[in-house]
Image (cartoon, rainbow, N blue to C red):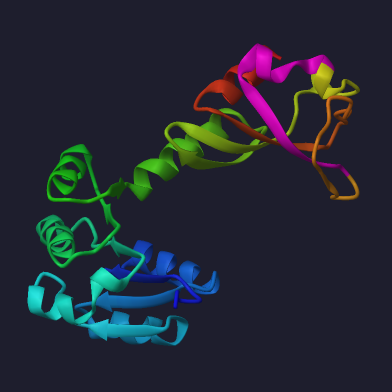
Amino acid sequence: MPREKPQAIVIGLGQFGTTVARALARRGVEVLAIDADEERVQSIAEHVTEAMCFDATEIEALQRASPETRDVCLCAIGDDAKEASIICTALLRQAGARRVIARANDAVHARILKLVGAHEVVNPELAFGERFASQIVHADIKGELLLGEGVLLNEVAPPKSFAGKSLGELRLPNRFGVTVVAVRKHGTGAVLLPEADTVVETGDVLVLVARDGAVSRMLETS
C-alpha cells in the first residue's frame, strides 16, 4: 500500500536545513533530520518525525537511515563543509536515493554536486539575493517565488496607470509576457481569479507569473 505521507531526509541542521525541515514537517511531511552535532539534533527533535545524530559522510551510518525509501533527500550541509556535502551527496546516490537535492555555495560547488549525482542543486543565498534585489529596485514588487526554469510568481502593486482599466485593456501577456493569475482586492482582501473584464483598482495586488525580468520591464515602462 502507498504511504499516506511523503517522507524526506534533511541532512545538515544549520539555519537553512533547520528551516526546511521544520517547514516540511508543518506541511505534513515525515521528516528525518540528521546532523553530526548533538545539540542541533536535540533542538529540532520535537518538530520533526525523527532526528538522528551521526556523520552522514559514513556510508554505513547513512544506509541505516534508508535513503532509498524516502521521497526526497536534501543535503543541506553548510558552506564550511563543502567536501562533506559532496561526499554526502555521492553517498546518497550510491545508497539508492531516488531524488537528491543538494545545497551549493558557489558555481564550482554546484557543478561538482551535479557531477557526483545530485538531481537538483540549490543556492539559497543566491536565490534570495536575486529576489530581494528586485524588491529593492522596484518597491512595487511585494514578493517573488521562483517556480523553476526562470519562471517567477510575483506579487505586485500595479502602477498608477493600470487603475480603472480592465485586464483585457491592459493586454499584459501580449505586451510584457506577464500573466495575471489572481487579484487581491484592496479593502476586502478578497482574492479573485481574474477575467478579461476584471478592473484593476488602486491598492489591489496582482499575482503574476512571468519570466525573470518581465515584471521589472512592465513596471519600468508603465
In the visual, does 28 lie left or right of 41? right
Residue 220 seen: no
Residue 79 is situated, as x and y percent measured from the top left of the image, at 21, 55
In the visual, does 45 lie left or right of 24? left
Residue 128 placement: quadrant: top left
175 or 218: nearer the viewer: 175
Numbered disc total: 0
**Residue 171: within the magenta?**
yes
Vertical position of residue 8 compared to residue 189: above or below: below
Residue 87 is situated, as x and y percent measured from the top left of the image, at 10, 60
Residue 204 placement: quadrant: top right
Residue 53 is situated, as x and y percent measured from the top left of the image, at 22, 84
Quadrant in which the C terminus is drawn? top right
Vertical position of residue 103 compared to residue 219: above or below: below
Vertical position of residue 173 compared to residue 152: above or below: above
In the visual, does 129 lie left or right of 4? left
**Residue 117: within the magenta?**
no
Residue 202 placement: quadrant: top right
Residue 169 is situated, as x and y percent measured from the top left of the image, at 83, 15
Residue drawn at x 13%, y 80% as measured from the top left: 61
Residue drawn at x 61%, y 19% as measured from the top left: 177
Outermost residue toward the front in this view: 1
Residue 34 seen: yes
Which residue range is magenta in the image?
169-186
Quadrant in which the N terminus is drawn? bottom left
Vertical position of residue 26 compared to residue 198: above or below: below
